[in-house]
Amino acid sequence: MAEKLQSLRGMVDLLPASIALWQHVEATARDHFRRARIAEIRTPLLEVTELFARGIGEATDVVGKEMYTFLDRGERSCTLRPEGTASVVRAAIQHGLLSQGPQRLWYGGPMFRYERPQAGRQRQFHQIGVELLGFADARSDVEAIAIAWDLLAALGVGGLALELNTLGAPEDRTRYRTELVAWLEAHRQQLDPDSQARIQTNPLRVLDSKHPGTQELLAGAPELADALSGESHERFSQVRHGLEALGIPFTLNPRLVRGLDYYSHTAFEITSDQLGAQATVCGGGRYDGLVQQLGGPATPAIGWALGMERLVLLLQQSEAQPWMAAAAPQVYLVNRGERAEAVALQLCRELRRTGIAVELDASGSAFGKQLRRADRQGAAWALVIGDEEAAGGVALLKDLRRAEETGDEGGAAPDRAGPGQRLDLAEIPAQLAHLLAG
RNA sequence: GCGGGCGUCGCCAAGUGGUUAAGGCAGCGGCUUGUGGCGCCGCUAUUCGGGGGUUCGAGUCCCCUCGCUCGCCCCA
């Protein structure tokens, strides 16, 4: 036998058994966005590398060491998208969407980051995200967060916490950054190596360090909040009050710093304590400078993205799993014999045409075997066609659930529901449609 | 990129250097060659992720490699 091939590391197959849950999430999200008047946008998985270098920031880990980047046959540097925002903004600029007024957009699909795989973290992973382009008011921050929060609630995810912070205006951040770097340099010797390395590249991220010694030291560091302008303060308080008015609970986390350069003002994460190290289910914030940075008109914006794999992980842990319902066939077509098989194939098509989920047994094995499979698959009804029926233009209809309801003696001889009801082939589609509707 | 744990049939899983690699689930076949859910019987790994080594002998020990997993890092 030839050597077996495997998927690439961190590239995961979604098998039929888990697809129902994914579709449930996608359908819920789609409907949620429809009602929120947010339109879907689909962008290519592959973009020019510069889009991410310029949009996300050269100094970030995502761009610096996690991208799938290669030269195509035309020697262009291409990158598999590591996130969705840059592409959406690029598309909005490229097609002049912004000159048609504010845009409310959502997207979903695979993203790629070359990281060490872990629970809730794959190299190809999936996000659903929302971008509100052309919205400056603090109310849009509140609305964006509410949309995320309500979507998760609609999906029945429990135990979530919303963490909130503000990064201030870009000027605030620049001012604070200078202050912070000076302080960090003064305490360089007491910092862990990772943090030392970040002083120049991405000093704000030092605040988020999990190193205990560094955290302790940081208690004496300058606070971003103190560097905020009055205006930024006011804005943040509007966001907080807005959330309070909606009854959405949150905690302030001054250490919450986004990894991507384009964020300013509001930053937030929705986390779960059930996910281990990768606790963030949804993260986002305001990015007023990005559109301009990518060559578009100055456009304020806010957005977020949620991680599908992490969400699915949480949903799999929950008790009620309503999405598991609909996998069974409604009708199982038992058929055997040359004439019967031809008739069954045709009947199967007609039934499917009327909207019924029909499993056609193609094994040609004994009637008993076929019925057994019908039962194991959880079919509601079985249609039995042998050559006798085929010759007479009829089929036998059996209710596979009736006997189960009446005879639950547990271990007693099966209480079979008789040979079934004899029906004309021509009447079957209508009859079944009626039965299944009732 | 750095550390720790793990890797036996599609899934779960016994096995801790010595004769033919348990068992359960699922699948397939039979008892029942035209009738389901229970039951019984049988079949399904010359092989223990892959490669090399130690040994008279290895799934069991060692090395390398691939993969999974947990943490660091990063982030959704």
Image: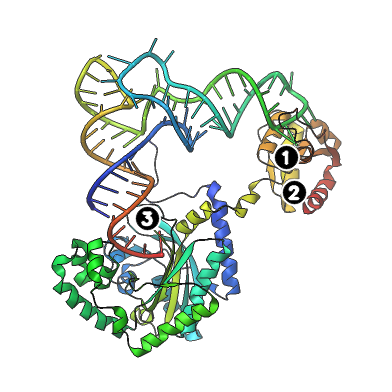
Q: Residue at x 46, y 56 (%)?
A: A309
Whole-Å distance between the Cαs marked 2 and 3?
Answer: 42 Å
Q: Are marks 1 and 3 on the same chain?
A: yes
Query: What is the crowding at mark 1: few (fewer than 14 residues within 10 Å), some, or many (at least 20)?
Result: many
Q: Chain of mark 1?
A: A
Residue, disc 1: A333
Is A22 placed left or right of B18 in the picture?
right
The amino acid type found where label 1 is placed reads Leu
N-terminal label among 2 and 3:
3
Is A226 placed left or right of A249 in the picture?
left
Residue, disc 2: A351
Residue A211: where, in percent of width, then height?
25, 61
Q: Are marks 1 and 2 in contact (CB under 8 Å)?
A: yes
Residue A109: where, in percent of width, then height?
47, 62
Label 1's element?
Answer: strand
**Along the viewing direction, whichever of A293 and A411 lies nearer the viewer:** A411
Residue A45: where, in percent of width, then height?
42, 63
Is A17 placed left or right of A310 in the picture?
right
